[in-house]
Image (cartoon, grey):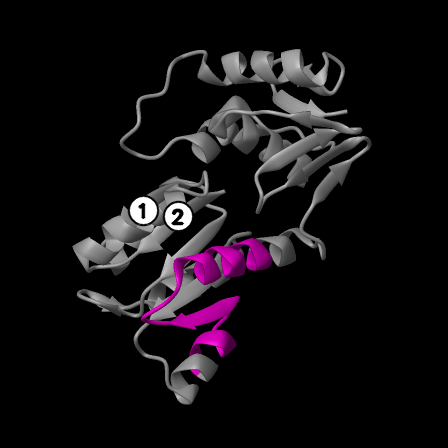
Amino acid sequence: MRILAVEDDPILANGLQVGLGSYGWTVDVAGGVQDALAALDCSSFDAVVLDLGLPDGDGLEVLRFVRRREMPVAVLLLTARDSAPDRVEGLDAGADDYLGKPFDLDELAARLRAVRRRVLGRATAPLKHGDLMLDPKARLVWLGDRDISLSRREFAILEALIERPGQVLSRGQLEERLYGWQEDIGSNAVEVHIHHLRAKLGPGLIRTMRGLGYALR
């Protein structure tokens, strides 16, 4: 999952980046409304963790931007403004969930997994495709009755593909899922990870659509 954390407190922003990154997710940080809008305008995210009290405006501006554009992104409000009227306003504006500060990191991660499932229209946590099963929380993969050990980026690619079985994902879409703004991307990085996945899962599961990208059979 690629996440945009919109938070102006540098210590908390770094904590979100490191903490959520420990779950194997790619996390970018924006410190205000305008930075968040620019990020959403040029990059694709699976979820936004959004503070409301930002130095250049209200975080609800970001939420309304996402909903006006009908972006398929989950938005979780993470804020000290935790009164009932604030929660009602945020949820009515289109937020998928609302969590007050201070918060527990494991609960935040669980809520992000839950809202992501709702965006994808899936009710259960394990993702299945034929004999293949992937558990996003435990970060485990099984093929039949065999455990498959994957690196963080191999897991991220497989998760992206199994979330959209049969849909072709381009190399650019997979790169956005794998890498944050500050990370260098090798010219054939995705191809290398796909090669390793095929070696572990068998050559027939992931197909290459020449000139388009990759999809699960």
The x and y percentages for residue 13 are 25, 53
Please report the residue visible at 57 percent of the width from the left and 59 percent of the height from the top.
115
Amino acid type, label 1: Gln
Quick one: label 1, few (<14), some, or many (20+) residues within 10 Å? some
Quick one: label 2, few (<14), some, or many (20+) residues within 10 Å? many
Q: Quadrant of residue 138?
A: top right
Residue 20 is marked as 2
In-front residue for pair 46/199:
199
Amino acid type, label 2: Leu
Please report the residue visible at 34 percent of the width from the left and 53 percent of the height from the top.
5
98 shown above or below 192: below
In-front residue for pair 31/20:
20
Q: Which residues are magenta?
A: 89-115
| Mark 2 and mark 1: Cα distance apart in space | 6 Å
Kindly state the secondary structure of the residue where label 1 is placed.
helix
Could you tell me if the residues under marks 2 and 1 are in contact, i.e. CB atoms within 8 Å? Answer: yes
* Quadrant housing the C terminus: top right
Q: Quadrant of residue 8?
A: bottom left
Q: Kindly identify which residue carries mark 1.
A: 17
102 shown above or below 213: below
Left or right position of 213 against 102: right
